[in-house]
Image (cartoon, helix red, strand yellow):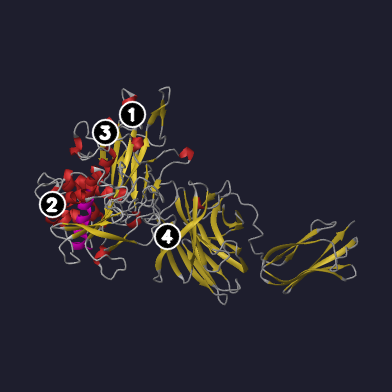
Amino acid sequence: RKFWIQSFEAFPPAPDLIFASLRSIGINCDIYVDDQVWKTKIDSVDLVAIVTAFDEMAPNDSSQGIAEALREFVGASEKDTDNNGKIIFVFADILDEYGKGRNDTKSSLFVHGYSTTIDTLPTETYSNHGDIIYLDVDPMSLNADDEDLQATYNTLAQEHARMIMEHNQPDQENWIIEGISAILQKKMAGDVKFFGNGASPSITSGNQLTYIATGYQSLKGRSDKYNAYLFLSYLQEKYSADGTGWDIIQEIAQSDSIGIKAVSDALVTLGIDTDVKDIFADYSMACYLDAVQADTLYDSRYSFEGFDLQTAPSGKPAALLSWDASIGKGAPYTKKDILPWSYNYLIMRGYSFDLAGNINSLSPDLNAEDILVFNGYDGINFKVKKLVLKSSFLDLMNPDYEVADFELDDQTSDGKLPVTTDTSFAFKDTLDNALNGVQLMLLMIAKTDDAQPPATYDFAVSNIVSVPDFSDLYAYQNPGIQNYLDLYVVSERRVYDQLGNEGAVVGYSVTSGDSGSVALTELTSFGSDFVIYHTSKELSTEGTYNFTYQGSDQSGNLFEVDSLTIVVAYYDPASASRIVACNAEYSLLRESLDNPLMIAAGTIPIHRSVALPEGFEPMSDIIMFGPNDKKLNRSATVIFSLKETEQPMSIYQLHKGEWRHIGAEIRGSLIQARTNSLGQFIVLSGLHGELDKDLVLPQQYTLYQNYPNPFNPVTNISFDLPEQGYVSLVVFDIMGREIVRIIDGQLNGGHHKFSWSGKHNSGRVASSGIYFYRLTAKDFQQTRKMLIIK
């Protein structure tokens, strides 16, 4: 009959149709052989041996054949798709990567055999409609090599076990099926074989226990299958109620539970009170060490009886942590893309030897007195063990070692552990003989969770247990975008949220009932020691806004809580307004601004602002009223209420990055001044100079004498306006003829200065002589004389 044969090549074509003839009939099996390989790769003698092994005497059990032994062990039988009560064996050349080695496979690897549930589905295009196991004959050659015949027994045991479990437990995870099928090779055939000759798989850190690559990826999935087999073998060695080890395997094989829960339930059924997460962590450390501790500590948890995984640390798949910030390789260290139920090794070297035998100190940022910090992704379970070795990087691991467990929080997966938990194993301790000193330390990190890797990172490792000197929250009203508050966090250390995203999060609540949080992203930084985060918050309603910030770093250290309160008042140009913040208030007249504005007011700590003028003492906090340096049409009044006032006190305003004097009028416990702009204000005590003309609105109109005078070719003309209005500044000659109109339009109140280059409106240069300039504003008019000399 014809059979569709599946390809396991790296770039697989559609299944190939072959013609095979029925060559042998057994009690539990019928054997078909591709006509092209009959007698060259397999003959009737081989078939007799195969039927005998499957029906009557398994290679490792003379009392029964493989078929009945497996059905009895698993507690079920295959589907019997074609109702003949038998398994069909098809011997043919299964196309794979043998001799090719494409797509990261090895040319020495091949598929011994396979079965597929497609054959049990009559509507599938490539279904062969039966319970069928396909067995390879190239490079396998059963009639020429007894080892190949033995490998066929292994394949029959594995594929039949898989077939039974897939039919009776269709929802079971593939790693359980593959692991049980592999370990049952040992029960049926005496050993376990993986794809290929002379190519034993090895442990691979980061390899997911609960995932098995399938299809054409099967060759690359050898490590997956080996990992599942090795874990079940560890269970078999360490967790058996009857001492045989097969009881735990049988309980898992017959369990109705899925995946890891099948293992947990099997432990419970056997009365073994050990969490499978702890078992997986011990297994993960055993895969690295495979050594019994010299003093027989740890109940042999970190070794295998049936496997030899011993190598030097240099031969293990571990990531090296340098602990050296001077070369850009300092803590914290993060690791991402950690697969479910996998383990990773992070190794740290204390010292090494050069060719002359001298000791070279390593890991300069990590010392025996430090605390190790593990910060796992919130909500994902980890198990972490610290291993300290009295071994060199290149020698076999010394059985005199120490293992200590991190105690991790169940919710946050955070924990700390001293670098030195036993003084006999102090990191970098050279002891009496440096060759046997404490040279290595390792963290085994097992992800005991089904969660997929998060978008950020799975965990961070460091020795940072302190909080930064500063990580402060600031707020200023945006001077350019109407009705927005700029929020800043200035931090000595980079800030991360609980999910590993960099950036500060600030919570807020408003007396109107609104509440929530805003995320701040990096605005600028100077390395990792000074970072500024920023966002803008719309001021959509009047009221009191309370902001709270508490940062944390990648080590999980929570910073000190910082908070601030902002009072927001709505200013309508049609009416006057009074804004109160802390012990200060700000009064605006009608039409002080052209448009309505939400004005934010609040306290700014002195240490978070521009340095105060030298020789002055602060007598109040800094109070912010609105956007800094936003000009007003009319003079406003700022008032501070103090416990006591004295003559040396005066009010200063931050203007263009400097504190400027705007004066003081003291009335009892109140001190006030007038200003022509919104911004930041403070009361200072000291020897004060003149008032700042840019900020203080004049009390009256004034036209000043030009300077220089006489002049050639440019002079400056200054004047004061107590309020906003229409202004003209015109130059005339001695005959009263207009020479130039310097300004003719609206100006805000304040001190103004314009320059004249000595030219007419037409651009012609004025001749030497006497000229007059006249200022006209509202009901005010004044004229002064000036002289051009050439």
Q: CA distance from mark 4 to mark 2?
A: 70 Å
In this picture, residue 630 sits left or right of residue 161? right
Q: CA distance from mark 4 to mark 1?
A: 45 Å
Which quadrant is home to the C terminus? Answer: bottom right
Q: What residue does disc 1 label?
A: 429
In this picture, residue 217 sits left or right of residue 486? left
Find the residue positioned furthest to the bottom. Answer: 574
- Look at label 2 and name its amino acid: Gly
Q: Of the residues tagged 4 and 1, which is closer to the observer?
A: 1
Where does residue 619 sit, x and y in percent of width and height? Answer: 51, 53
Tell me which label, 4 or 2, sits earlier in the chain: 2
- Look at label 3 and name its amino acid: Tyr
- Which residues make up the magenta segment? 154-170
Q: What residue does disc 2 label?
A: 65
Q: What residue does disc 3 label?
A: 401
Q: Nearer the viewer, residue 548 or 319?
A: 319
Q: Secondary structure at mark 2?
A: loop
Q: What residue does disc 4 label?
A: 506
Q: Secondary structure at mark 3?
A: strand
- Few, some or many C-alpha atoms within 10 Å of disc 2 (few <14, some 14-19, many ≥20)? many
Q: Secondary structure at mark 4?
A: strand
Q: CA distance from mark 3 to mark 4?
A: 46 Å
Q: Secondary structure at mark 1?
A: loop
- Few, some or many C-alpha atoms within 10 Å of disc 4 (few <14, some 14-19, many ≥20)? many
Asked whether residue 466 is in view, the answer is: yes
